[in-house]
Structures are given as C-alpha cells and as structure tokens.
Amino acid sequence: MAPDSKETARRFVLGRQGLWPGRRWEGRRDLKRAVQYIGSVQFDPLNVVGRSQDLALWGRIIGYETQDLEDALYKTRSVFETGGNVQIRPIAELQYLRVAMQRKIAEERWSRFARANAGLLARVTREIERRGPLGPSDFVGSGEKRIQNYRAGKESGLALYYLWLKGDVMIAFRRHGEKVFDLTGRLLRRPTPDVPVPEAEEHLILGTLRQLGVATSSEWLRHAWARIGRLTLRNEWPDRTRRWREQGVIQEIEVDGWKGPQCILADAVSDFETIRSSEVPASWRPRSTTTEEEVVFLAPLEVVSSSGQAARLFDFEYVWEVYKPASKRRWGYYTLPLLFGDRLCARIEMRYESPSRTLRVLGFWPEEASLRRDSAFASALGRALHRLAKFKGATRIEVVGLRSPDMERRVSRAVADSA
C-alpha cells in the first residue's frame, strides 16, 4: 500500500486536537467534553493577549469565556491541575495518574525532602485540616523559614508543592495568581478508586498516543515513559507494542516523507481513512466557520506546534521566544502561529491593552510574501481578530503591525464586516 500523504496525517493530528476543520464544541457545557477529547491543556500564567490555556480553549469552543474554565476547575471540578508541569486534565484521569504521582515523590530529591521535613509536612497538613484552604501567604510568623527555591519562597510553600505532587492536596482556587490548596478528599465529591498499576500504566501509555495522533514507536515511548514516570518502560517496549499490534489495539501506517512506520490507535483508524478519502469525520464537522474561513491563533504550548512538532507536521519553525532576551528574538515576545486551513502560514504578535480596551497587532511574519496579497487570508484574519477582540472585551483593533497598508485595509474591512 502506498504511503499516506503528509497532508492526511497533518489533518488527522489537527483533528484529533480539535483544531481542524473548525470549532466543533460550543458553550461552557462542552468544555469538559473538549478537554476529554484532546487529553489535556497546558497551563501558563502569562497573560499578554490571553493565557495559553484560555487561547487553547477559545480556539476550539464557540463562545468560550475564561470563567468557564474557572468554574470547571474550582466549582464543578470536572477538570483539575496536575502538579509539576501544570496540565489541565479531566478529573477522571486522577485515578490513573496516582501511579505517576507516587513515582514522582519517590525520586531521590523528593524522598530526601520528605524525610528531612516530616514534621513540616505534618504541620502544614494539620493547618489545612483545621483552617481550610491555604496558600503560601497564609503561613506567617517567626517560625516560617525562608528558602531559595524557584518553587517557593519559604518552607511551608515547598511543603504545599510536595503535597500537591503527591496528590494529598489539590488547588482549591487561585488568589491573585497564588495557588490556594485544600485536601483532595475534601474537594472531591467522591473518592477516586484505586487502579492496579498495570491498568493505570496501560491507560496512560495509550492515552499519550491518542493525544499525539500518530507517532513513531520511539517518539511515543519518549512521551509515554514521562507520563507514567518510569524510564524502565523502554526495556519492555518492544513486547508491549508487539502485543498491542497482535491484539488490534494499535496499527502502523507509513507517511510520505516521514521516517519509519507510524503508530496509530486502532479505534482512530476510521477517522484517518475518512480523511484519506478527502472527507471530514462526521463528529469533526465545525459548528461555525472553518479554518479556511477564519484563522486560529494557536496557543504557544499546543501539542501540534510546540516542542518541534511544527517542523514535523507543517515544515514550519516555531520557537516561543518569551523567555529569550529581546536581542536574541527573531520574531516577538509573545508570538503565535496562525492556522489557516490545515497549514501554519505565518506568525503574529499581539497585545491586549486593558486600559484602552485595545487589541493591538505588533508584528506579522508570513511564510510567503504573497500571503499579504491574499484576500481570502485577509478576510479569515479579520474574522479571527474580531472574535478575539470580543473574547477579550476590546472595543478597538489596531492592525498597523501588519506592515502593509493594503493588507491593513482588507483586514480592517473584514473586522467591520464581522461586527
């Protein structure tokens, strides 16, 4: 059988992440469904034109509001934030992730911390039991020892972080950006059941492939061992993947231009075959505009474009330069990739200025110069800017950063037509 095209694979991965061919979820009730489908959303506190997690959900859910995520996290608790590399996941994943949590705190640095600070951990736990939800700033007094650690500024804060990694506490809410924790058993309506280690590992490992869409065996392994917290997974990897192939859990495909066979979950093959036939799976059909009609500003931490994935899927270079010195940036401080159709075609830097309620385009870098003359693209960009301005509450949109008077006129016209 001839290899599949990169276009087919790219559309499948985008679709598995809910980004193509357009927004398929709508309203706050669909937030849980969206996160369950895509697997997770990475949290980041920076808010330049929107926080990364909000941009990710805005790009997938019609009518998304930041309060929808706040309510899902801290009221209904249909999703939660994992410790460490903060990922927002469905609450149902907690029972499986406990295996990885226990392995994390068993690492030498954390087991050493627990041994040396048993009394501190017991005291912090008692304080939460007695006083209710607490953040680091709630621990005050002469007995609070200051430390130099990028996780916390004092020992009680690091103790809270450890208890979060362990799963004993969860984030009850955020107070001006500060995490405020409460006991997990007090926050959840029902206790999470214990899942046998083999079952939990299999669920998490297969979940990584579901999130990636397609991956080589070695690429899948890199993500899988990190998810379960066990490097020795590589020793049994050939046997595991062989068993899954024989059981029909996974299949292998070839993609033109990609090295080696690519793994895909068997229950996703029907969607892949639909795309191969130049059709769109029924459950993927957008509820409003397609990505041809309205571009999507991808969040900086998207699975499809971060960590080198943009090069593999789109032949597109994307580096989030927010942590680079200004002198070393090729593009801008908070630059986002633009998804137009099924391609990343440009980078854009924007900023929302709340005092003047202005959404400002600061810079624009197309992959091809002809994109500035493309009227269809200008219309798609204008619609997206209008939607983003509405989401942010902006009353003005300034597009001088496009650096093309003709393009500025077309985009401004499209913004006005969308109003």
Image: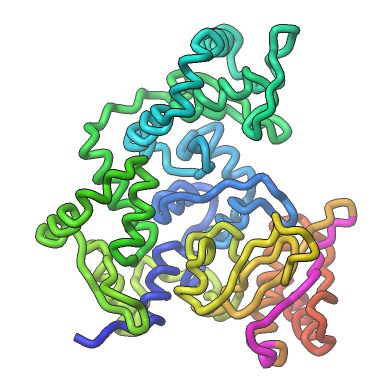
Q: In the displayed structure, would residue 6 be above or below residue 12? A: below
Q: Which colouring convention does the figure follow?
A: rainbow
Q: Which of the 4 image quadrants contains residue 103? A: top left
Q: Which residues are magenta?
A: 356-371
Q: Is residue 88 left or right of residue 217?
A: right
**Which image quadrant: the N terminus?**
bottom left
**Which image quadrant: the C terminus?**
bottom right
Q: Which residue does the image show at 70% across and 74% down from the upper left? A: 418
Q: Which of the 4 image quadrants contains residue 78? A: top left
Out of 198 and 229, give the one closest to the viewer: 229
Residue 385 horizontal/vertical position (percent)? 71, 69
Q: In the displayed structure, would residue 62 be above or below residue 122? A: below
Residue 349 horizontal/vertical position (percent)? 74, 67
Q: Is residue 216 left or right of residue 414?
A: left
Residue 58 horizontal/vertical position (percent)? 59, 58
Q: Which residue does the image show at 61% across and 60% down from the upper left? A: 300
Q: Which residue does the image show at 66% across and 70% down from the upper left? A: 384
Residue 201 visible in this rendered orientation of the protein = yes
Out of 108 and 245, give the one closest to the viewer: 108
